[in-house]
Image: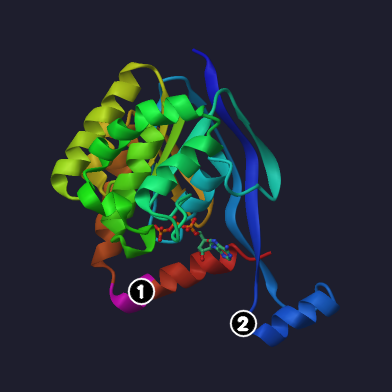
Amino acid sequence: MKEAVVVKNVSKKYRMYRSKKEQLKDLLLPGKAGKNFNAVDDVSLTAYEGDVIGLVGINGSGKSTLSNMIGGIVPPTTGEIIKQGNTHVIAINAGLNNELTGMENIEFKCLLMGFSKEKIRRLTPEIVAFSELGDFIYQPVKKYSSGMKSKLGFAISVSADPDILVIDEALSVGDQTFTNKSLDRMNEFKDKGKTIFFVSHNLGQVKKFCQKVAWLEGGKLKKYGPTQEIMKEYEEFIDQYKKLSKKEQEAFRQETAKRREG
Ligand SMILES: Nc1ncnc2c1ncn2[C@@H]1O[C@H](COP(=O)(O)OP(=O)(O)OP(=O)(O)O)[C@@H](O)[C@H]1O
């Protein structure tokens, strides 16, 4: 088995301020105001070629931050990520230019991916058809719903045929028909031995689609292993969590947040 993505002791720290004044003070007198917050805290994991890995965890646990680091959109503060192959991130708001039309975004993103004019001309009808946007393809993206943006992002990224694909909640906003079509395409990717990271709150999709699951809690990797085993524990945790009162849930979040400071 060949390693596709190796995440080594990766952390992402953000500076947190309660006000603009605090932010300014920190700028003038570094370290005197604000505090560090570990969005992702010392995570290590290895994905092998052909692995389809679900990233799960409650809101704010660090899934998007980790997937954006794997996708190369956000640099880690410490640690390193070694990847074999080119990577694409599909997220609801990632990478599309709101001022451009759908059509212009296709050309723009394809140029960024290094495609020739000829290749773009050849691929465009396929991308447009996959996106199901019809005449909306000529409208600026700022007029799109989140489902429409996700459809366009998805259509462009799958046409790029990347070795490593990061899908962040992109399937959660589309309609069922589009989601099924996208899952079929993902299964083709899977069959071709590509490596996929799949961020989702839809536990049914994670169980159906992923062979492995990484469970994040408070920025840390709590568990990583085969889907069946991890999802059993995660679902038990979610059941317990849902049974807590609003106040208890808040206390749990506060306590986890406290551990992330520093
Ligand atoms: N640019 C940023 N500046 C400051 N804090 C950030 C930034 N991005 C993320 N965070 C914080 O890092 C933590 C992890 O956020 P992240 O979006 O990775 O979580 P998530 O698990 O994807 O959440 P969700 O399920 O709600 O999408 C959150 O507490 C968030 O507020």
In the rendered structure, does residue 247 fall within the stretch colored magenta? yes
Coordinates of residue 80 in the picture (x, y in percent): 67, 37
Circle number at residue 112: none
- Residue 120 horizontal side relative to residue 81, left or right: left
Measured Cα–Cα span from mark 2 to mark 1: 24 Å
Q: Place residue 262 in its image quadrant.
A: bottom right
> According to the image, label 2 marks what residue?
18
Residue kind at label 1, given as amino acid type:
Glu
What is the basis of the colouring in this image?
rainbow
In the rendered structure, does residue 21 fall within the stretch colored magenta? no
Coordinates of residue 184 in the picture (x, y in percent): 22, 29
- Residue 233 horizontal side relative to residue 17, left or right: left
Residue 40, compared with residue 249, is above or below; it is above
Please give the name of the residue rendered at 65% of the width and 40% of the height, measured from the top-left corner. Answer: 9
- Label 2 or label 1, whichever lies nearer to me, is 2
> According to the image, label 1 marks what residue?
248
Q: Place residue 199 in its image quadrant.
A: top left
Residue kind at label 2, given as amino acid type:
Arg
Whether label 2 lies within 8 Å of ligand 1 gets the answer no
Coordinates of residue 251 in the picture (x, y in percent): 42, 74
Please give the name of the residue rendered at 53% of the width and 23% of the height, measured from the top-left corner. Answer: 4
- Choose between 23 and 134: the one closer to the eye: 134
- Choose between 192 and 13: the one closer to the eye: 192
Element type where label 2 sits in the image: loop
In the image, farthest residue toward the left: 177
Circles 2, 1 touching at the beta carbon (< 8 Å): no
Which contiguous range is marked in magenta? 245-249
